[in-house]
Structure formats: structure tokens, C-alpha cells
Image (cartoon, coloured by chain):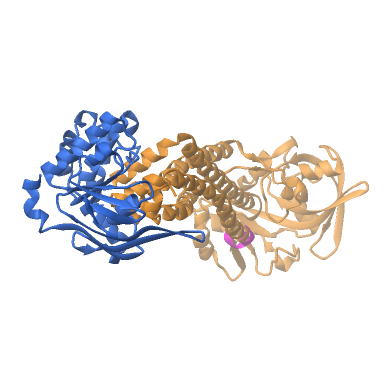
Amino acid sequence: MFQLFKMAFRDLGRNKRRTILSALAVSVGMGLLLLMSAVLVGEMRGALQNTIQLFSGHLQIRGLNYDENKISLKWEDLIENPQALIDTVTAQYPQIVDATPRLVASGIVTRGENSRGVQVIGLDPESEANQVYRQGVIAGDFLTSDDREGILIGQPLAEKLGLAVGDQINLLVNTSNGDVQEQMFTIRGIYTTNTFGYDESTVFLPLAKAQTITGAENRASLIFIMLQDRDQADSVAAALQSPNYTVVTWRDMNAMIVQVEDFANAYMTIFYLIVLGITATVVSNTLVMSVFERTREIGILAAIGMKGRRILAQFLTEAALIATIGVIGGLILGGALSYYFELYGFPMDISKMGLTGILINNRIYTHLTLDNVIYLSVLTYIVTLLASFAPARMASRMEPVEALHGK
Amino acid sequence: MKEDSSSKEFTMEVTNISNVTRTFTIGKVETRALRGVNLKIESGEFTALVGPSGSGKTTLLQIIGCLDQPTTGSVIINGQDVTKLNRNQRADLRKGTLGFVFQFFALIPTLSAYENVEMPLLLSRQKNGTRKERVMELLNAVGLADRAHHRPDQLSGGEQQRVAVARALATNPKLILADEPTANLDTENGRQVMDIMQRLNKETGVTFVFATHDPRVIKYAQRVVTLRDGLIVENNGKSAQA
């Protein structure tokens, strides 16, 4: 075994430049794949984190008949006196970090000739769970609980309608009795969550004002709950079950992201194999050249009694060494790139893509997982060895007498 | 040497070749390199195969050495009909029974002189201690113990060929086949290599068969077998075949 490695090592050293180029091909291929996997994981992780933080929370308590797609405001679909329920559950379950009522309505924002369909969310400006919006205010101020004329709008919407802090807009909303109500609001602040799709279509009112304008009175569409850890969602949801309301978890609400991730993973595997196929061709080519250059030596080794399988093992060992150097290089390259983009983010101008439904951040922060590191290292190794098999077999099947004559 | 191995000479046949032909086909052209060769080589011989280029010397050596297979005929090496052996069995026979010295200095360039001689012993799975001892013994025998850790490109042609002789002897083979071993050497180095081969033949009793057309090398041989056009025409001074 030692002899195999010693000979392989020296054989690779004969043409250092070629060996380095082959290993480099493996390194670059694998490094880029690691980065790609880190982008995908980071993107999905970011999307999930965003969606949980902004939109779904870890849990939501909803009225029994509430259908989030219809954005119903009928009293029977809403939760009456949500604060009482919040007080009860937070006292009972220490896993709940924040619980806050939200009222969701559909509406239309109009400014002069321009109008846009929006989702109007009434929230409690004092709640910890809503601080993410307070932190995202880039102009003006956040809402206050007793504000009756103020509205918070997203940056993309402000840009599209040419709005600034202090400007007035007309907001038309659906009401609980099926009518519409409209009122002029003053823009108190402009926010960003760096999530274009969300910021473009969501405006905020203080909960009390939202309840008044929609006629929901003291009702809310849902109670938005954040837990200490998202893994507690299932157990807390099970404990919260009641005949008076339904409890849904972040997993139920984000099924689409999970599906997209599954699809992306399947797609990526094909992509991995294409890239590795190209690098494997380089390694295979190197070994073919090496076999041709060493034909006479193969003849000598066969003449002194080296069997075909030992010659096969010799070339496969050389391929394994190239693969090892390549994989180490790939880990360094991919690790460094992933680490850099994990710190500084990867610019991704989603606004031009028209993507909705998934809250993808405008900057993707890569995240390299141990699973992907192991998977891609092993995959690179196997593909490289498989590609080396043909030249190694060619060497092992040479007739000694022909090989000795360099044929 | 005759005295040392005379008892074996009539009892042990290292090689027995009967009616061997070898035809090469290149495109549509058939070349008959051997046209019915019969040859017996007995243990301890120091035999030269001589003849002009294209007479079939190398082809015959390759067939005796199990590097090539005859088109027809039988080849018995050390009591075994090698035409019935498969690839791996032929490799095993080469490893244990045969040694080779080629015209070109056939050393592995990435291995030192020591490692080149050690290679057949590694393939025979000999233990580390005995291996080391054997390699140094052989390098001493060819006068290269002090060059043990030099790579082939740091050795002269003569030295390389002496390492090849040491390697051929490593596993104590019955028969060593040398194809024009001095063809690429100057007179002095050629003489040294032949002296060493002759001495080892006498000291160890190992059989040598070498192909040559150099009269200075032929004079070392105890027995001279002459080939012409794929046939043995003279065997130790006697006309062999019509």
C-alpha cells in the first residue's frame, strides 16, 4: 500500500504543472459547487427566516373559519378580544417569547392617478415582535398606538408612487360588513425589510385604527406568536389546541419554501454532476496522457510480474491523490468564498425578477452546511475516481510485449 | 560453472520449445517471425541467441519470457506449458521464475537503484528484512552498493544496465533473458555487464539466455544458437535444421 502511494506520488511529481492543473480543475469545480450550495442554503434559510419574522411567526392562532387567502374580515372569522387570549397563553406557556394581535385587510393605495393593491396590516406598535419594522424605518418615524391618521409604507411602494414622509395618500379598505371605507392618511415613515416583494405590497396602520376603519372593533385576524426556538412549534401548537380557534405552525404556513428547496436541491444535483463531469474529463485526460507517456514502463512492470490489477491500482491511486489535493483545494476555495459572502452578503436584485410569494432578501447571505461539505467532497471524489477508471483500465490491459515497444 | 551445475544440466530442463511459430499480421501483411523453432535450454546454461536483425531472436526471447504467445507450438518453462496459462498465471511465472534485462535500460525512472531492485521482491511479498538484505547483496554483486539511492538519471548507461541485471536476479529466478544487453553500451561498460552476468551464472548457477549480434559478447557464451529468417540454423556449431 505504502509502495503504491510512494510510486503514485513520484509519478505525479514528474509533471508537476500538469498535476497541479488537474488538481486545480477539481478544486475550482468543487469550490464553485460549494459556493452554489451555500448560496442556495443561505437563500432558502434567509427566505424562511424572513417569512417567519415578518409574516408567519412561529405560530399563529386564528379564528376557526379564518381563511388567510380570502383575508376575511367577517366577525365570525376573527378572534374576539385577542388580548385576553394572549394573556392566558403567555402565562401558561413560557416558550412563548412574544404574542401580538394583527388585523389583516386588503386595500388600495391611491396617490393622484396612481394606485396599487396592498395588504393592510394593523399591528401593535409597542409589541416586541413588531420591532423588526421599527428597526427597518429608513425615513420618518414608526407608528404610535394612538395615531389615527398615520401610515407606514414600504420603500419600493414609496418609490413607485413618488411618495415621501409627510405626503398624504388615500387608502381604501374592505370592511367587516362587506363594504369599503376610505380615508386620507399621512405617511409617518418609510420602512424596508430588504425584501422587495413584501415591502412593495404591505402597509401598516396601528391596530386600533385598523380595527376602526374596517369595523372589526376589538377583533383581530390572528395572534402572531414567536417562540424561544422554532423547533418548539409543534409541541406548543399541540398544547394550544382548542375547539374555539385553530393553531398553525411556521411549517404549515411555509410549505411552499420547503417545496421550492426540494426542487432546487434536485436541480442542483444535476448541475453538480455537469460541473464535476467537466472537471473529471480534465483528470481523465491527464491520466490518459500519463498512460501513453509511460507505456514502456508499464511493459517493464508487467515483465517483472506486476499483474493488471496492481497496475490498475497504481493509476487509480494517482487519481485518488489528484482528487485528494483537488478536494482539499476545493474546500479551501469554497469555504473561503462562502465565508466571505456569509459575512458580506451576495447582492441579488430581486426587484427585476418579479418574484412573489417567497420573501427573498435583496442580499443573500450564504450558508455552508456540513452536510453539503461532506456530500460534495464525497461526490467529487467518486466522480474523479470513476473518470480515472477508463485510463487506468487501459494501462492494466496492455500486452507486455506491445507496451515494451511503446505501442 | 560446468562442474558446479553439471549434475543439473542433464536432469533439469528450464525451457523446451517445440515447433514454435509466431506470425504477426499488420494490415493485410503477414510476417512470420518464427517458422518452427525447437530448442531446449538446460539449467545453468550461458547461451547466446545470435543472428542478423529480423532473424527472430527477440521474438523467441519474448516467447520464452512469457511476454508473448506463440501462434502454434508448445513452450514448456520449468515444467509448465505456458501456452495454457492465463494472463495472471503468466505474470506469476515471470515474477517467480524469470528475469529480464532489456536492450534499453529498462529501469523505472522515479525509483532509485535500490527501489528498482526491490520491486520484484515487493511483488513477491518478501518480508522487509530479507528484502533489504537481498537488495544490498545484489547491488554489491554488481558493484553498485554505493549508488543504491541514485535515480536512473543519475547513473551511467552501464550502471543502469548493471542495476537491471541485479533486478533480474532479485527473486532467484531459474532463467534470465537478456535482449541485446550491451547494444547501447560502450565497449568497457559492455564488457563489465557481460563479466558480471558470467560471474553470476557461475556463482549462482542461474541460466542466462541472451540475444546479441556483437562478436565480443558472443565469445562469452558456452553455447551459441544461430537464427536466420525465423529458424534455428546452427546449434553450438552444428547445423540444426534444413
Q: Residue A149 is drawn in which quadrant? A: top right
In the displayed orientation, state which residue is furthest to the right. A113
Q: Position of residue A277 (x, y in %)?
A: 55, 52
Q: Nearer the viewer, residue A395 or B242?
A: B242
User: Which residue is at 68% across, 40% downward?
Assistant: A136
Q: Nearer the viewer, residue B123 or A268?
A: B123
Image: magenta residue range: A251-257
Q: Position of residue B13 (x, y in %)?
A: 16, 58
Above-or-below relation of B157 to A81? above
Which chain is displayed in orange in the rendered image? A
Q: Position of residue A334 (x, y in %)?
A: 53, 41
Q: Is residue B115 visible?
A: no
Above-or-below relation of A294 to B31? above
Whether residue A311 is in magenta: the answer is no
Q: Nearer the viewer, residue A30 or B132?
A: B132
Whether residue A254 is in magenta: the answer is yes
User: Which residue is at 44% across, 47% downward?
Assistant: A291
Q: Residue A140 is drawn in which quadrant? A: top right
Query: Across the whole image, how many numbered discs are drawn on residues?
Result: 0
Q: Is residue B35 visible?
A: yes
Q: Nearer the viewer, residue A32 or B128?
A: B128
Which chain is displayed in blue in the rendered image? B
